[in-house]
Amino acid sequence: MIRFLLYPLTVFVLVNIFSIADAQIHPKEALGRKIFDSFRLNKFSDFYLRSIFSLEEDQFRDFLFGIENLELRQNLNQFYTLDYPSSAKTAQEKWKVAFAYTWRDQWRHIAHHSPKMVQRDAFDPILREAKGFGIQWDTTRLIGIEVVLDAHWINDRFEVKRDRMIDQNNTDPNTLFFDRKLNYRIKLDKSTHGKAFMIGYAPEDSDKLYKENILGNGSGQQDAVLRFDTPFPDRLYYFCPDEKNAGGLILINDHDDINKPNQRTDILLTFSYGQPERAYQIIVKDVLSTPRGEVFCERPEWLGEVPLPRGLKFTR
């Protein structure tokens, strides 16, 4: 839906193995609940207000200019094909020039999507798919809201879906950023078979695994499911115990910490329906934080009936 948001993000879920009854709701989790309720109540207006297409022109311009995301900035810079003026010497000065040249085209693309188009292309298809499964929304139950991070084994290391800080001097490019009070599911694909994905307090030390609120740490099978709720630790490491330099640093922040990239995040919604209960999923793609709140930038996708994912339960 947005030309410069070309690839999917990460997503989040309410994992029943972790108790969060007294926790403040993370904005991305709140967005997931709102999106699910918009389908459950057939309330398109609530759905639309959580999309990037509901932003006003000045809101979109200011959000895009200040976004802390190297990949998005690089994508936008590709649309600038002129020579930079001699006065533009620093990366920030060049960004100002390129942004002034490119942002209106991006806004025209956004503004082209009327509410009717968004409803036709992004909202109604989910309801049609659910109807095909005989789902009656008023008896569904939301059981999961997760950030999904796809992980692959490429060039002798784990490549986990991430976006980077604009200033590459701030952090190593292999650093992963996680928020507290948010559930993550790291999905390992076939390329990682035989490569144990571990998270621990020290790099490449399997004796110092992180064990609190985590499933599948180092098992090398299925998904790794984790959540950080406490102020500490604020840093960990991901690695493969059998391979050197296969991972990197994990930095753990509060959701309102500005010293992290504004990451494109895929939100995975898992809900149950029927007797006996069955699990179904919707993925809300490319969620970004804006001064007005969390918005999604790509049409959600109906994933249909799925085996109950690891870490989720039908019963509370």
Image (cartoon, helix red, strand yellow):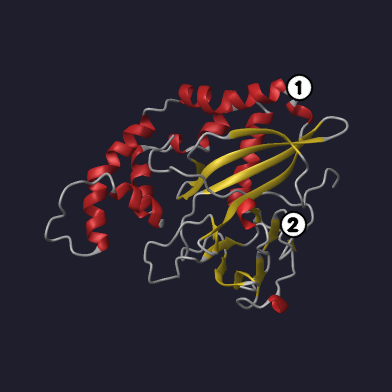
Residue that carries the numbered disc 2 in the rendered image: 20
Q: Earlier in the sequence, mark 1 or mark 2?
A: 2
Q: Nearer the viewer, residue 207 or 293?
A: 207
Residue 147, numbered label: none
Task: Classify the position of the N terminus by image quarter.
Answer: top left
Name the residue furthest right: 276
Q: Are marks 1 and 2 in contact (CB under 8 Å)?
A: no
* Count of numbered labels shown in the rendering: 2
Residue that carries the numbered disc 1 in the rendered image: 134
Compared to residue 26, the image places residue 211 above or below, namely below
In screen coordinates, is 97 left or right of 7?
Answer: left
Local crowd size for mark 1, using a 10 Å CA cut-off: few (<14), some (14–19), many (≥20): few
Compared to residue 46, the image places residue 129 above or below, namely above
Whole-number angstrom distance, CA of label 1 to CA of label 2: 32 Å
Q: Quadrant location of residue 17? A: bottom right
Compared to residue 226, the image places residue 27 above or below, namely above
Tell me the amino acid under the disc marked 2.
Ile
> Residue at 67% across / 46% down in the picture?
145
